[in-house]
Amino acid sequence: MPQGIAILGSTGSIGQNALRVIDALGPDYEVVALSAHSSVELLAEQTRRYRPRFVALANGDCAAEFRALVDGLDTEILTGPESLTELAESDQVETVLTAVVGAAGLPSALAAARSGKRLAIANKEPLVVAGELLTRVARENGSTLVPVDSEHSAVFQSMQSGRSSEVSKILLTGSGGPFRGATRQELEAVTREQALAHPTWQMGPKITIDSATLMNKALEVIEAKWLFDVPVETVEVLIHPESIVHSLVEFVDGSVIAQLGEPDMCLPIQYALTYPKRVAGLSKPLRLEEIGRLHFERPAAETFRALPLAYEVAQTGGTAPAVFNAANEAAVENFLAERIRFLQIMELVEHCLDKHDVRGTATLDELLEADAWARRQVSDRVKQKV
Ligand code: NDP
Ligand code: MG
């Protein structure tokens, strides 16, 4: 029987790459379910091509338009924000690839973990917002979490050289984004287009802006803490502009094990689906002699405030990471809409963290409340012209 896969967020950058990976993997892997928010035309095209048993459209307002486009197909159509959760729980699905952007993917990721599915996680924000809850629910229900994020896939692969108790350090690499080496003064004037021009990776707009502020690396530090069950201080960031060494693990005996490859998400997506097996796939072979040199440096934490904040919020715990993430999501939306300047993204995040009364041990409802509170704060502040 082929492995039945649900791709949540199939119209996005990861989602579309995942479909290419599944095409190349052949008949052992079957697309059983797809979902989008409102990209009806692309979702309809994918539905006609893959004939999944279910599709979910989170934005119910587009339902009629979508139904008209796929008229006559025997795919079951679910609509509304809850529809992704239904897909994640379906008996026909063995593996859920979460490729939704933002905390909006939390309910469906939790549902997949609760139903004991293999969870291939690209959508990092739910792990930041509710890492304790999500990893606990997965553990209690026998759900395997396999990272798709390239750094975490590299760590996951490197971890197989030792036991978790033998790890002394996790070194997450990051390209440094388009503004590596810039001063705060230079960052004052950067435009949306400059921030969207990532030097090494092709990704959706939100994560591309997060890469420019280093918020992406900050979220990844917290993501690593939960995925690998380590204190946050064990996770360090190393800037590596070529994006070839995807991350490294240092063990207690001093050995450092890394995973290398071209900057292409197809490999980590594929590994999350085939793990523990490896099969030939789409990735281009790595030719180190053509690359020649690899560089590493410390991140500029004074310029890119997201990184020190990540350690603070991870140590504080409770509702703090949820506020950190939601304030950033809302601020990035405003930056993409050209309502605020680049440096104001992190100012808004810091403002929300300063004003927030942290709840130490937070329930799902409290986390969602903190998330909504931070989004309102950002919106009010932007309306007052920051
Ligand atoms: P994109 O913006 O390209 O795609 C997002 C997907 O999520 C789309 O299918 C979109 O549908 C859907 N979506 C958006 N909002 C909602 C919502 N409220 N409810 C349900 N579905 C929604 O993002 P990426 O593919 O770049 O990133 C996805 C996730 O993977 C992020 O968490 C990111 O951090 C992570 N990631 C991405 C990498 C990359 O290379 N892109 C690398 C590592 C991690 P629609 O098209 O209809 O809007
Ligand atoms: Mg990454």
Image (cartoon, grey):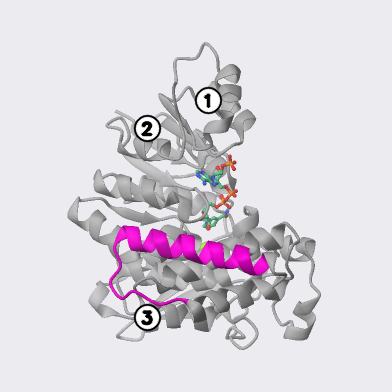
Instruction: Report crowding for label 1: few under 14, some 14 to 19, many 20 or more residues within 10 A (C-alpha).
Output: many
Q: Earlier in the sequence, mark 2 or mark 3?
A: 2
> Please, what is the three-letter code of the amino acid marked with disc 1?
Thr
Residue 221: x %, y % from top left: 45, 73
Identify residue for label 2: 28
> Please, what is the three-letter code of the amino acid marked with disc 3?
Thr
Q: Earlier in the sequence, mark 3 or mark 1?
A: 1
Q: Is residue 194 magenta?
A: no
| Quadrant of the image occupied by residue 155 | bottom left
Q: Secondary structure at mark 2?
A: loop
Q: Nearer the viewer, mark 3 or mark 1?
A: 3
Q: Nearer the viewer, residue 1 or 368?
A: 368
Residue drawn at x 38%, y 70% as measured from the top left: 319
**Magenta part of the protein: which range?**
356-382
> Please, what is the three-letter code of the amino acid marked with disc 2?
Asp
Q: Earlier in the sequence, mark 2 or mark 1?
A: 2
Q: Is residue 214 left or right of residue 310?
A: right
Residue drawn at x 43%, y 67% as measured from the top left: 322
Determine whether label 3 and label 1 are within 8 Å by CB. no
Residue drawn at x 42%, y 65% as measured from the top left: 370
| Quadrant of the image occupied by residue 157 | bottom left
Q: CA distance from mark 2 to mark 1?
A: 19 Å
Is residue 364 at least partly visible in the picture?
A: yes
Q: Is residue 159 left or right of residue 284?
A: left
Disc marking residue 47: 1
